Amino acid sequence: MRKQLIYLVTGSVLGAVLISGALSAASTTKICFEAELGKDVQTPLKVVNKASNNWSGAGYMEVPENSPKSKGSASYTITVSDPGYYYVWARTYWKDGCGNSVGIQIDSYSPATLGQDGTYNHWHWVEAKGAKFNLSAGKHTIKLLGREPGIMVDQIFLTKDSEYVPVAIRPVTQKPS
Ligand SMILES: [Ca+2]
């Protein structure tokens, strides 16, 4: 009986170790930074610094309504500590159907389009569907690209987990340089 109990306890401990091992393998690096901290900002993209509970940090990046299409950019240098394939998301706000997308370019990859969805007048996360980026450890350049007017971008988020869907404001993990 005593021996059985020992086996039982040992088995549970082993099970717990295996489960925690599986969890740590499944949990992946997440990178999140504020869109308004972009450098070398080119119009019509512009930084809006305004405090609110509706967005994170000091404000957001905006392409004002009635701006030209496919113009404007902002640059971010981020540091990747965990190399691998990353998926990119942006926390966005579309004022109406005239503008519901934004572009993101990472290093020398082709620019990816995020959005083209039907969620208006509401902050929400959109992803670069079908795009993943192989990022080595070290510094990488991310560019936010204007595509359509009447849009705002609060945060930019990268994850190695293809199943992960960010919700609401995410914790900032680094300040881009
Ligand atoms: Ca922000």
Image (cartoon, rainbow, N blue to C red):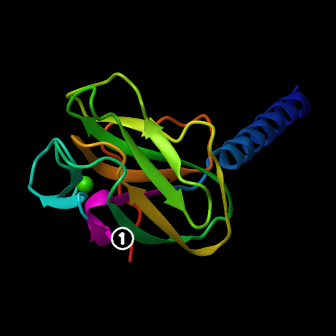
Looking at the image, residue 152 sits to the left or right of residue 73; the answer is left
Percent position (x, y) of residue 109? Answer: 62, 59
Q: Quadrant of residue 144?
A: bottom left
| Residue 58 visible to the viewer | no
Q: Is residue 35 magenta?
A: yes
User: Residue 90, percent across and down?
Assistant: 40, 46
Quadrant where the C terminus sits is bottom left
110 over 140 or under it: above or below = above
Residue of label 1: 175
- Ligand 1, image quadrant it occupies: bottom left
* Residue drawn at (31%, 58%) of the image: 35
* Residue type marked 1: Lys
Can residue 107 be seen in this snapshot? yes
Element class at badge 1: loop
Question: From which residue to which does the magenta span run?
Answer: 31-42
Q: Which residue is drawn at 29% across and 35% down?
A: 99
